[in-house]
């Protein structure tokens, strides 16, 4: 049996859960109060950067993220334009848009970051 592989997968799940808990705790602490202007965008950009760094540490060559999943993971609702714009801000010269609707603001907007 591949114990090392299983342990690594479990550790990744723990890290992902810890990230989600941190986001949720932040949302609960600020419940009822709107964050300062630009805070949501900052949250999304931080989330994307953490995902990219995590993928690099795992030795992956790329990571593909979708706006609907990001919005859900960060704990936002009805913020797809903000999420899509934050994703675009995180793009570099090696990034590519995998899928985009005519509006460019859908839950299926997908970008692939190559390293």
Image (cartoon, rainbow, N blue to C red):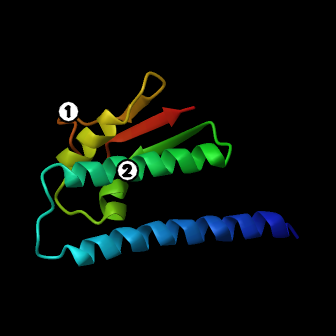
Give the CA distance from mark 1 to mark 2.
27 Å
**Residue at position x 25%, y 36% from top?**
101
Which image quarter is the C terminus in?
top right
Residue 107: give x, y in percent of width and height: 28, 50
Residue 83: give x, y in percent of width and height: 26, 48
Residue 13: give x, y in percent of width and height: 58, 69
Q: Is residue 67 visible?
A: no
Mark number, residue 46: 2
Label 1, residues with CA under 10 Å away: few <14, some 14-19, many ≥20: few
Secondary-structure class at tag 1: loop
**Residue at position x 54%, y 46% from top?**
53
Which is in the foreground here, disc 1 or disc 2? 2
Labels 1 & 2 near each other (Cβ < 8 A): no
Q: Nearer the viewer, residue 90 or 104?
A: 90
The picture quadrant where one finds residue 14 is bottom right
Q: Would residue 37 appear left or right of 58 to someone viewing this image?
A: left
Image height check: is 92 above or below 43?
A: above
Q: Nearer the viewer, residue 28 or 85?
A: 28
**Residue at position x 78%, y 63% from top?**
5
Image height check: is 105 above or below 54?
A: above
Which residue is tagged 1? Answer: 102
Image height check: is 43 above or below 104?
A: below
The picture quadrant where one finds residue 114 is top right
Label 2, residues with CA under 10 Å away: few <14, some 14-19, many ≥20: some
**Residue at position x 49%, y 71% from top?**
18
In the picture as drawn, the residue positioned furthest to the top comes out as 93
Q: Is residue 2 visible?
A: yes
The picture quadrant where one finds residue 56 is top right
Q: Nearer the viewer, residue 47 or 66?
A: 47
């Amino acid at each position: 049996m591949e114990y090392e592989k299983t342990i690594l997968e479990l550790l990744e799940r723990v890290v992902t859960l810890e990230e989600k808990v941190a986001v949720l705790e932040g949302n609960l602490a600020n419940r009822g109060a709107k964050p300062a202007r630009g805070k949501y965008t900052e949250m999304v950009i931080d989330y994307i950067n953490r995902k990219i760094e995590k993928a690099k540490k795992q030795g992956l060559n790329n990571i593909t993220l979708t706006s609907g999943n990001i919005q859900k993971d960060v704990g936002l609702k009805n913020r797809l334009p903000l999420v899509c714009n934050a994703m675009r801000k995180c793009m570099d010269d090696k990034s590519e848009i995998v899928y985009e609707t005519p509006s460019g603001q859908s839950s299926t907007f997908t970008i692939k970051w190559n390293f």
